[in-house]
Image (spheres, helix red, strand yellow):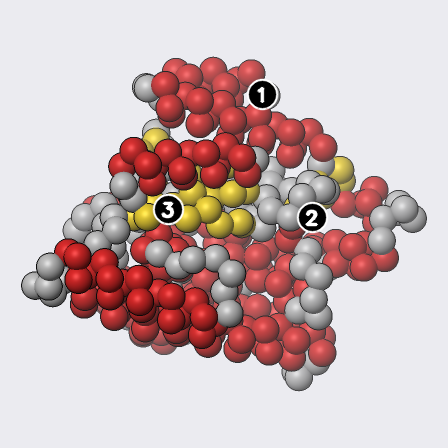
Amino acid sequence: MRRGWLLIALALTPGCFKTKYLLQAAAGQYELLHTAKPISKVLDDSRVPPRTRYLLGQVAAIKSWGTSRGLKPTNNYGRYSDLHRSAAVYVVQACAPLSFDVKRWSFPIVGTVPYLGYFREPPARAYADRLAKEEGLDVAVRTASAYSTLGWFRDPVLSTMLSDGDEALGDLVNVILHESVHATFYVPNQSSFNESAASFIADHLTPELLDESFGKGSYPAKAWLKDQLRGDGWRKRMHETYEALDALYKSDRPDSEKLFEKARILEAVRQELGLRRALNNAWLSGSRTYETGSAAFDRIRAACQTWPRLLVAFAGLQESDFTEAQQQAFDPVLDALARRACQ
């Protein structure tokens, strides 16, 4: 399996950088799959912490519930991989310093993407540093607890998907549903749409599952919603900052003034939120990818009425339904889809 993927990567991908990148991705994916164990065996292993076994014991029911709502049944999440690290992948993003023009990479099958995922942190940071130095870009290296291989492999549950707080069960539900959305439909060259759709669907389905499975107002449901509310405040502040900087960049002020005002705004937000890391355009554009078009999603959900019908509609989307690659404003796409598929 490892050799087959490596040969495919080398055959399809021109250029030294892309070849090296896919080689590390292939090696990391192979290691992850090679160390995964059937969840049934993990549940019977007394050496595994009870909390881990409890959470893993919920996976089959989460998958079954998601299927009942129209998510594609897959062979994913039947195994468990303990990564012995805090992140599944380290995601590199880059953006112009005085606009929200994000850097994109192009690969066979998936098309263009606004980020790269590394299985080890040092090469991720080395490449980010290279982008900052050689191309003068704002860069960010963020962690991700999970990712989807879009059906190419049987994705296991990762130890990074099991958070430490009281919201752990809700988080596990959310990430399984989110990644299951990606397995149900995926539009090439439309990362913003894919991520926004998966976030919208999973964020609405998660409290439904928790209420049905554990009772309305149950402790798992309350803990997850409380954590979500904390995150909503942070996301709102990031959106406000994005809007302020976008207006600044589009103004007629000299670049020197824009850079000074950008630094002032970002430092004020960093101190306000108590962040250790410095903010930049790459961090802001990355968070925006997951927060696009919620009003249009609400409209199409109301038009379709049921989740299975909505998911069938989304699965029918083609690249030709979008006016450009990596489209950011896709309200017209969703409204047209609602009229075509849900009315």
* Residue linked to disc 2: 159
Q: Which amino acid does label 1 sit on?
A: Arg
2 or 1: tag closer to the N-terminus: 1
Judge from the rendering whether residue 162 lies leftward or rightward of residue 67; answer left or right: right
* Residue linked to disc 1: 2
Q: Look at the image and tell me in which quarter the N terminus lies.
A: top right
Judging depth in this view, the residue of 179 and 113 nearest the camera is 113
Q: How far apart are marks 2 and 1 (CA)?
A: 22 Å
The residue at 66%/76% (across/down) is 223
Secondary structure, mark 3, is strand
* Residue linked to disc 3: 139
The residue at 57%/62% (across/down) is 174
Is residue 95 positioned above or below 25 on the image? below
Counting from the top left corner in percent of width and height, residue 238 is at: 38, 68
Judging depth in this view, the residue of 268 and 247 nearest the camera is 268
Secondary structure, mark 2, is helix
Whether tag 1 and tag 3 are in contact, CB under 8 A, the answer is: no
Judge from the rendering whether residue 74 lies leftward or rightward of residue 128; answer left or right: right
